[in-house]
Amino acid sequence: MNSFLEFLKKHWSTVAGAACGLILGILFLTIGFFQTLLLVVLSVAGGCIGAFPAVRQVICSWFKALFEHRNS
């Protein structure tokens, strides 16, 4: 067990890449290419929105302006 944890610590990026490849392969087989591509694009966009506070603030202010205009 200890050697397995050492292996994971040493090669964590390889294991993470293999896990992502496995998940993408399963998604390709179950829901198809374009649905998987859309899912990946939306996930990356959501990750970027969550990772960068400036982008998040711009999008939040855009949505607030959009819905305040409709309520007036």
Image (spheres, grey):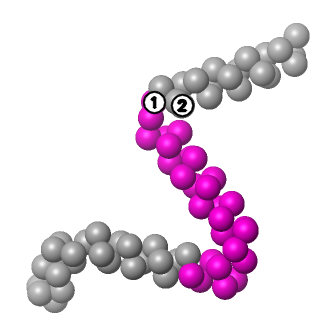
| Quadrant for the C terminus in the image | top right
The reply to whether discs 2 and 1 touch (Cβ–Cβ < 8 Å) is yes
Q: Which residues are magenta?
A: 25-53
Residue 32 shown left or right of residue 13 in the figure? right
Using the image as rendered, state which of residue 50 and residue 25 is in the foreground: 25
Q: Position of residue 61 (x, y in %)?
A: 63, 20
**Residue 70 image offset from top left, x and y in percent:** 87, 19
Q: Amino acid at mark 2?
A: Arg
Instruction: Give the residue type at disc 1.
Output: Pro
Indicate whether residue 41 is drawn in magenta: yes
As drawn, 17 above or below 22: above
The answer to whether 59 appears left or right of 53 in the picture is: right
Residue 57 percent coordinates (x, y): 54, 25
Q: Residues within 10 Å of mark 1 (few under 14, many from 20)?
A: few
Is 43 above or below relative to 33? above
Residue sitting at x 78%, y 21%: 66
Task: Kindly identify which residue carries mark 1.
Answer: 53
Residue at 69% over, 83% down: 30
Quarter of the image for the N terminus: give it. bottom left
At 13% from the left edge and 79% from the top edge, which residue is drawn? 6
Instruction: Identify which residue is drawn at 62% across, 26% down.
Output: 60
Write down the residue under mark 2: 56
Q: Is residue 43 left or right of residue 18?
A: right
Element on which disc 1 rests: helix
> Is 30 within the magenta?
yes
Q: Residues within 10 Å of mark 2 (few under 14, many from 20)?
A: some
x, y percentage for residue 18? 39, 79
Dominant secondary structure of the residues highlighted in magenta in the image: helix
Secondary structure type for disc 2: helix
Q: Quadrant of residue 39?
A: bottom right
How far apart are the two marked residues, 2 and 1, measured between alpha carbons? 5 Å
